[in-house]
Image (cartoon, grey):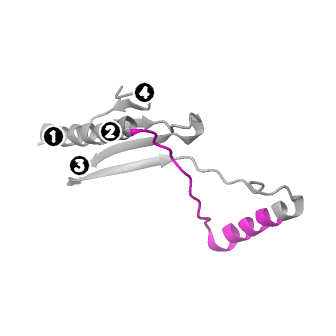
Amino acid sequence: MISKNVMKLNNFDDSIYYKADCSCGDSDHEILIEFEKDKECPDMIFLNFYKNIAWCSHWGSDNIFYNFWKRVKCAIKVLFTGYVELEESFIIQGEDSINDIIKALEEGKEYIKGTENDNT
């Protein structure tokens, strides 16, 4: 465990995982951070962020017809383009939380670099 909001979940031969919680306290807002290396690309370290993102058609409006129209527009966009763009916030409150995420990133980088030396 790194801190209150950042935790090491697991490590394997070629990857290490961390979980960072949003400072708002909602467990749906967490981010999974993965460091990974590929034996075929030994000079590369992959840093992946995984986050569940949700979209709500009735956010900001109580009008049932407008909300339905937003759903239809979104469905049409997915149907014809194959995707929809979304964004979501992740709140980091305070300097300590930022430092803990930086510490997790540095620790993960060093772990992956250390596993490279083990395989050579």
**Residue beneath the point at 37% across and 41% down:** 98
Whole-angstrom CA distance, mark 3 to mark 4, is: 33 Å
Q: Which residue is mark 2?
A: 99
Tag 2 or tag 4, which sits nearer the N-term? 4
Could you say which disc has been placed on residue 119 in the image? 1
Whole-angstrom CA distance, mark 4 to mark 1, is: 33 Å
Tag 1 or tag 2, which sits nearer the N-term? 2
Q: Which residue is mark 4?
A: 4
Find numbered disc 4 in the image and state the secondary structure of the residue it sits on.
loop
Q: Which label lies toward us, 4 or 1?
A: 4
- Magenta residues span 69-94
Is 49 a magenta residue?
no
Q: Are marks 3 and 1 in contact (CB under 8 Å)?
A: yes
Find numbered disc 2 in the image and state the secondary structure of the residue it sits on.
helix
Say what amino acid the circle numbered 4 marks. Lys
Find numbered disc 3 in the image and state the secondary structure of the residue it sits on.
loop
Tag 4 or tag 3, which sits nearer the N-term? 4
Q: Which residue is mark 3?
A: 39
